[in-house]
Amino acid sequence: MRGSLLVAGTTSDAGKSVLVAGICRWLHRRGVDVAPFKAQNMSNNSVVCADGGEIGRAQALQAAACGLAPSVRFNPVLLKPGSDRSSQVVVRGVVDGTVSAASYRERKAALLEVVTETLADLRRDHDVVVCEGAGSPAEINLRATDIANMGLARAADLPVVVVGDIDRGGVLAHLFGTLAVLEPADQALVAGWVVNKFRGDPALLAPGLDQLRALTGRPTLGVLPWSPELWLDAEDSLGHVADGVVGRPAPPVGRDWLRVAVVRLPRVSNGTDVDALSCEPGVAVRWVTEPSRLADADLVVLPGSKTTVADLAWLRSTGLADAVTAHAAAGRPVLGVCGGYQMLGRRIHDPHGVEAAPGTVEGLGLLDVEVTFDVAKHLGTPAGTALGEPVTFYEIHHGREIRGGGADPLVTLADGTPEGVDAGHVLGTHAHGLLENDALRRRLLARVAAAAGRDVTPAPDTVYAAVRAAQLDLLGDLVERHLDTDALERLITDGAPAGLPTVQARATS
């Protein structure tokens, strides 16, 4: 079996990432050599690969579904938004400047060559490559310079399946309209539909799908049911909704629950760092955006941020900074990760204007550390020990820590270098993925439970990697059970069928 497929979506968060991961898992379990690919991703949720660059975390998840280690080839262009109007550009894993929406259009011709060359390499090295689009192919105002949806499909002759989220409402109109606004040569590659997040009686949906086929000449390849068990590795901050419990935590091993409040910063990055906490029985993790939500928390987490200084100002303007400080003053645990760690220190120096205008701002002063932003981004996948346990993790940051004389490290790298600060009830680190280390996570939770005076026994058998693998297997199961996999395989190997009809957006006279 050899071939490729592009999964596009009617909207952002329609289900492209999880569908690609599910298809990859389904193929991998059949023994197919499959790899994921997303030409251009826009997300502040990224990981560092063994080959030294960073890619979107969704592509790392998809790589895991394929049984592969993350590689910069799986996501050659990554945009990391720093504001509503500008983004840092990462090309083949390395930062390559900052762009506005207008200036990025001028770079796309060169980037199209980058993505098509990378995809061609992957297709030579793997039997199947499953590609993920970006946003929606119906963004016709961007079509002329598109490198991720129909622009990529045309350049690489990829058959396209479009997935729509029925939970948002209007999915049949979204699917029809996506096709109808495309030019005929693009429409010729759109070969079918997938409906995502359906709950209810499939018989009620069937007449609509029949009519959709009559109107478009294209079949629905399947209807994926709503699955509340799927929650790990949210693609971006759209998944970090305030006040709801993250995941599906099992009842506590002891008598009490532990309550974790994660501050939902405006430019939160790598929010998936707290996912591992949500895998633990008896640990209720919530994203919060206002001070009262910290009042009954046993642990407060300040996560990463793409714009640390701006998000620190927001923290102060909302009263959350005072609430975090009061929480720490009462001897209750606070954990800062990357940008959140930098906020907890004494000062943040930005002499080169990495984030905004050059200058220095005061931090919250809860840790004896200062941070200076370097122009070059620090990327790494080190190992070491933390809280007496061996750990692995990854680092993505411009900040360089300047430690105070009395600051004990949270992490000690394999070469003896100290990293982060452990001040007892206040901890900070640049390490992403640290909580995915099972023994370290249990030690931290035991410390939090002791500080809170709660009867909580960390579960001895929670293995984060196994939880993640189970989610991938669930995705593979959903694809196998609810999609027409024979039709999907034909699309992958044979491409879009010839003679697909062109649909008019409106009647012509």
Image (tube, rainbow, N blue to C red):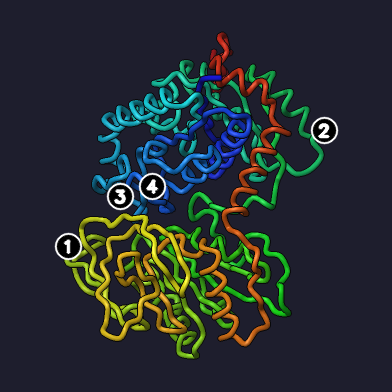
Look at the image and tell me in which quarter the C terminus lies: top right
Q: Are marks 4 and 2 in contact (CB under 8 Å)?
A: no
Label 3 crowd bin: few (<14), some (14–19), many (20+), radius 10 Å: many
Label 1 crowd bin: few (<14), some (14–19), many (20+), radius 10 Å: some
**What secondary structure is marked by label 4?**
loop
Q: CA distance from mark 2 to mark 3?
A: 47 Å
Q: CA distance from mark 1 to mark 3?
A: 16 Å
Which residue reaches farthest bottom?
A: 330
> On the image, which quarter does residue 116 sit in?
top left
Q: Which mark, residue 49? A: 4
Q: Are marks 2 and 1 in contact (CB under 8 Å)?
A: no
Q: CA distance from mark 4 to mark 3?
A: 18 Å
Q: Which mark, residue 88? A: 3
Q: Is residue 314 left or right of residue 15?
A: left
Q: CA distance from mark 2 to mark 1?
A: 61 Å
Residue 10, compared with residue 415, is above or below; it is: above
Look at the image and tell me in which quarter the N terminus lies: top right
